[in-house]
Amino acid sequence: KAGLLLDRMLAAIGFERSTIMLGNVVPWRPPGNRPPTQAEMDICRPFIERQIALAEPKHLLLLGNFTARFFFGGTGTIHTMRGQWRDVAAGHLILPALASLHPQELLNAPASKSLAWQDLLAFQAKVARA
């Protein structure tokens, strides 16, 4: 369900999954669905940064609390980090990144969809200006 919602979210701002790069910060689900440890994140960081560097995107849309913390640092919640453009380093690139709510969170808390929509519109506008 979350994947279908992601497809609809992307389509609403003119993107198709086949035309963008999607990635996971940690490409496995830790046992018990627990959050990844710092050691697991540190192991994965060079790989995701290299993937981004090879793809050479112009912008990043970071979905979810974990991903926003991974790239932005800190311990804030997605609700305090979302909607703010920040620069993110990935290899030789410095990219503008916007954090928003993960589709799974939107399925669990549909009232937050308006916040995600604001973020998607901001992302669409920044991409259109590039």
Image: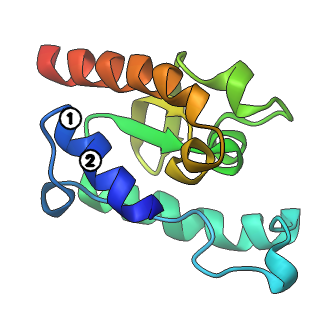
Q: Nearer the viewer, residue 113 or 95?
A: 113
Residue occupied by mark 1 = 12
Left or right of 63, for residue 96: left
Q: Position of residue 108 (x, y in %)?
A: 65, 48
Q: Is residue 123 above or below residue 62?
A: above
Q: Nearer the viewer, residue 2 or 29?
A: 2
Q: Quadrant of residue 7?
A: bottom left
Q: Quadrant of residue 120?
A: top left
Q: Quadrant of residue 125?
A: top left
Q: Position of residue 59 (x, y in %)?
A: 32, 34
Left or right of 6, for residue 110: right
Task: Indicate the quadrant containing the N terminus: top left, top right, bottom left or bottom right.
Answer: bottom left
Marker disc for residue 8: 2
The secondary element bearing badge 2 is classed as: helix
Q: Is residue 18 above or below residue 112?
A: below
**Mark 2–mark 1 distance (CA, rounded to whole Å):** 6 Å
Q: Position of residue 110 (x, y in %)?
A: 56, 36
Left or right of 99, for residue 70: right
Q: Is residue 67 above or below residue 55?
A: above
Residue drawn where x is 59% and y is 27% of the image: 111
Residue drawn where x is 87% and y is 67% of the image: 37
Q: Mark 2: which amino acid?
A: Arg
Question: Badge 1, how many Cα within 10 Å: few under 14, some, many 20+?
Answer: some
